[in-house]
Image (tube, grey):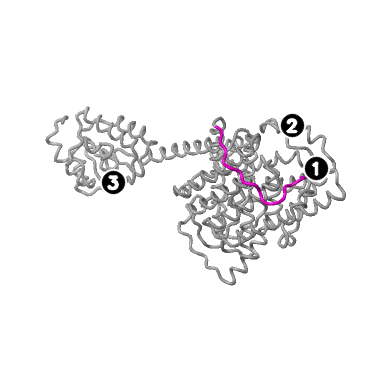
Amino acid sequence: MVVLASLVRDDKLALPAGTVTAENVHRTAIQGAPLVKLSTVTLRGDLYGGLTAAVVALPLSLAFGVASGAGALAGLYGAILVGFFAAVFGGTPAQVSGPTGPMTVVMALVITRFGHDPALAFTVVMMGGAFQILFGALRLGRYIGLVPFPVISGFMSGIGCIIVILQLAPLAGHPIPGGNMLHKLAALPQLLATPGKDALALGLLSLALVFLMPKRITRVLPAPLIALTLGTLAGMTLFSGAPVIGDIPTGLPQPYLPTFSLTDLPQMLISALILAFLGSIDSLLTSLIADSITRTHHHSDKELVGQGIGNLVAGIFGGIPGAGATMRTVVNVRAGGRTPLSGALHAVVLLLVVLGFGDTAERIPHAVLAGILLQVGINIIDWRYIRRAHRAPRAGVMIMAVTLLLTVLVDLMTAVAVGTVMACVLFVQRMAAAQMKSMKLVYDPDHVPDLSPQERDILDRAKGRIVIFHLEGPMSFGSVNGIMRMLRSSAEKDILIVDLSDVPFIDSSASIALEEVIEDAHRDKDAVILCGLRPAVLEVLQKIGVTGMLPAERIVGDRASALALADSLLPTLDGSL
């Protein structure tokens, strides 16, 4: 079972039994989260959980800020502002929010595209937050989980690949090459062939620490913090030739006013929608993980509003966008955090660190942060799905692979759109095949086992002049061709009974196909009787106008009534109406 949280996690996690899995993650979060009452026990747990989450968040926020191109301080303020406001206004009590790998990748693209004017870049962050608030206000949270799993797996794995690609150059002591992803990939061989020895040593040290640190130690101190501390000390003493972060502005950030450019507005909207969409998925998946551990239920729409407010404020004050962070949330819960106080406290602790120790961060080598982020990128890739790809359904594997490649080589929105369309087309094809199997034309009473003696007698006497067309299951546009093909290939008849008693739903396309069936029957001088219409089906057929094509007496409640009516009509039909 693939733990879907592994797609969005920041570090290796050992989640407890009962964790939400890929097979059930698309179930909608239960609305109306119960209130968590604050007590002495929860207060103590929240204090410890918030402090612990802040310790975990510090190195990751620095790394994500540098990787985004906005700077280390932007990463810290993103963690502070998103973490605080998402906790206060969100719908997942124990969730800790802040910069994450997926959001950082998108922010790096935003910085690349609008770097000529930072105000435009942070306006995009504000717009993304506003879109998330809109998603929550429109109650779209329940629909976020309907994105097909292979698509989620593909674009999250693609984001993991992007993080790895972007961090290889800093690991070797070089700046990240410019251009699109293909240009970056083309430049890597030369950069890796000429590494800076001090930077490479620090990067490999950092990478080894985050991957190989014993669990008995990481239970006390998170591996990224250990790697950050030891790597920085090593850079200050043994490997001083490695590039470092450099000057970081001190004090509180200056606010950015929203800035718009008519030329850039279409791209700003697209980038903001990507941020909002990805941030919503990232946060709600983490909310499901928090639910499974705390045995509570989050409020998905309220969570979107809280995340939106956090990202909106982060954009105003020059912070990078964030989302619900899986590792920080799990660490918080395990430390005792149960209420929004823990998430808000984590943000306050980070603010105190920024105001008191900002100068220390200037000496952190880029290669150390690259090593930390390489582990993040590697862990975001859905290795479990990849490992079982040889026995997984081929269609799902293809959708995952296409989404992954488009995420890396084109952009996230295109990848999600193409992957979702592929999954929908596949679903429609399978539904149409299932609907075709449920359709049957009945001439012979021996083909219907549940006929009453009276119904059997009517069909026997009709000698094929009465045909029952039985449909079963939801009827949608995928079944239109099947309906038309089956009826037009049927033998000569005088009366057609369309039995919809086992159809719970019919869409407009299938309704129009049924209308054409009735029109064909009228041209052939055949009578048509509808039976078994459920209220939802009857409502659709009335709106489309199908029921108006027949006399009211030829729409009956069940098959027995339809056969009795057909039997009474036969003597009046001499091969024509």
Residue drawn at 36 percent across, 44 percent down: 473
Which residue is denoted by mark 1 in the rendering? 243
Magenta-highlighted residues: 245-261
Residue drawn at 54 percent across, 36 percent down: 270
Q: Give the percent coordinates (x, y) of residue 468.
A: 26, 39
Q: Give the percent coordinates (x, y) of residue 338.
A: 57, 64
Secondary element under disc 3, as helix, strand or loop, is strand
Q: Relative to 15, is 418 above or below?
A: above
Q: Is residue 349 left or right of residue 481?
A: right
| Amino acid type, callout 2 | Ala
Of 275 and 516, the residue lying toward us:
275
Q: Quick one: label 3 or label 1, which is nearer the N terminus?
A: 1
Q: Quick one: label 2 or label 3, which is nearer the N terminus?
A: 2
Q: Give the percent coordinates (x, y) of residue 260.
A: 56, 36
Which residue is denoted by mark 2 in the rendering? 187
Secondary element under disc 2, as helix, strand or loop, is helix
The reply to whether the C-beta atoms of the residues labelled 3 and 1 are less than 8 Å apart is no
Q: Residues within 10 Å of mark 3 (few under 14, many from 20)?
A: some
The reply to whether the C-beta atoms of the residues labelled 1 and 2 are less than 8 Å apart is no
* Measured Cα–Cα span from mark 1 to mark 2: 19 Å
Q: Quick one: label 1 or label 2, which is nearer the N terminus?
A: 2
Q: Work out which quarter of the rendered image holds the C terminus and state it.
A: top left
Foreground label between 2 and 3:
2
